[in-house]
Image (cartoon, rainbow, N blue to C red):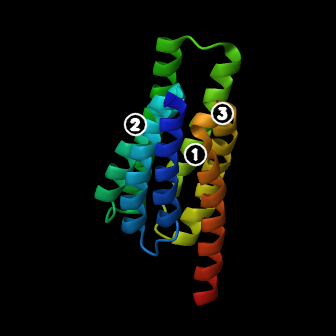
């Protein structure tokens, strides 16, 4: 079986975890499920050759665990964590570019999910699930672009982001209806 197929299978599994995560009513449950999805996506990029995806998902794994620990912190403390994770995302980008020497076009493509990661990380600063999901949609848009560029190996990631946005919109609608 081709490596890309393994990547696709792993990204599809990650997709299922993330879709379920965005339907969670509690942030802790969302973060736990998102951690599992992140692990599968990270390994899917190993098989599909999506280098920047590997580096960022490693940071995202730390991000999920850190925000799980910071669940009861004040918003100001969570913002400090946000800045630290953003430095980690920027560092992952610099490390990727330094080690892999991608072309200018690939460097720019790889920058798209880094910018999205700033939004995705900021989403976890919020305790309000509606606000969290709204901000997280910007992150999903960046991954749609990046996964579309990576190709078939990131098919699960691409489809996952489409379904993530649908799941987030549905959850926002549901939560607003219940308010």
Whole-percent x and y of residue 95? Answer: 46, 20
Q: Nearer the viewer, mark 3 or mark 2?
A: 3
| Residue with the mark numbered 1 | 157
**Of 43 and 80, the residue lying toward us:** 43
As drawn, 116 above or below 124: above
In this orientation, does residue 115 appear?
yes
- For image coordinates 36% across by 60% down, the residue present is 32
Distance CA(mark 1)–CA(mark 3)? 10 Å
- For image coordinates 58% across by 64% down, the residue present is 133
**Helix, strand, or loop for circle 2?**
helix
Whole-percent x and y of residue 136? Answer: 58, 56
**Of 134 and 36, the residue lying toward us:** 36
Q: Are marks 3 and 2 in contact (CB under 8 Å)?
A: no
**The residue positioned farthest toward the left in the image shown:** 69
Q: Would residue 173 appear left or right of 66 to someone viewing this image?
A: right
Distance CA(mark 2)–CA(mark 1)? 15 Å
**Helix, strand, or loop for circle 3?**
loop
As drawn, 170 above or below 146: below
| Residue with the mark numbered 3 | 151
Q: Are marks 1 and 3 in contact (CB under 8 Å)?
A: no
**Number of numbered tags placed on the structure image:** 3
Label drawn at residue 58:
2
Q: Residues within 10 Å of mark 2 (few under 14, many from 20)?
A: some
**Helix, strand, or loop for circle 1?**
helix
**Of 57 and 130, the residue lying toward us:** 57
């Amino acid at each position: 079986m081709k490596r890309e197929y393994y990547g696709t299978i792993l990204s599809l599994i990650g997709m299922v975890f993330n879709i379920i995560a965005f339907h969670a009513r509690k942030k802790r449950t969302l973060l736990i499920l998102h951690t599992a999805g992140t692990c599968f996506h990270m390994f899917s990029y190993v098989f599909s050759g999506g280098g920047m995806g590997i580096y960022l998902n490693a940071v995202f794994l730390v991000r999920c665990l850190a925000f799980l620990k910071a669940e009861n912190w004040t918003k100001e403390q969570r913002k400090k964590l946000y800045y630290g994770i953003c430095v980690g995302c920027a560092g992952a980008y610099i490390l990727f570019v330094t080690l892999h020497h991608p072309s200018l076009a690939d460097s720019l493509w790889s920058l798209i999910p880094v910018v999205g990661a700033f939004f995705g990380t900021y989403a976890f600063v919020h305790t309000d699930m509606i606000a969290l999901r709204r901000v997280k949609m910007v992150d999903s848009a960046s991954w749609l672009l990046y996964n579309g560029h990576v190709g078939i190996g990131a098919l699960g990631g691409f489809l996952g982001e489409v379904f993530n946005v649908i799941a987030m919109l549905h959850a926002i609608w549901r939560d607003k209806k219940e308010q």
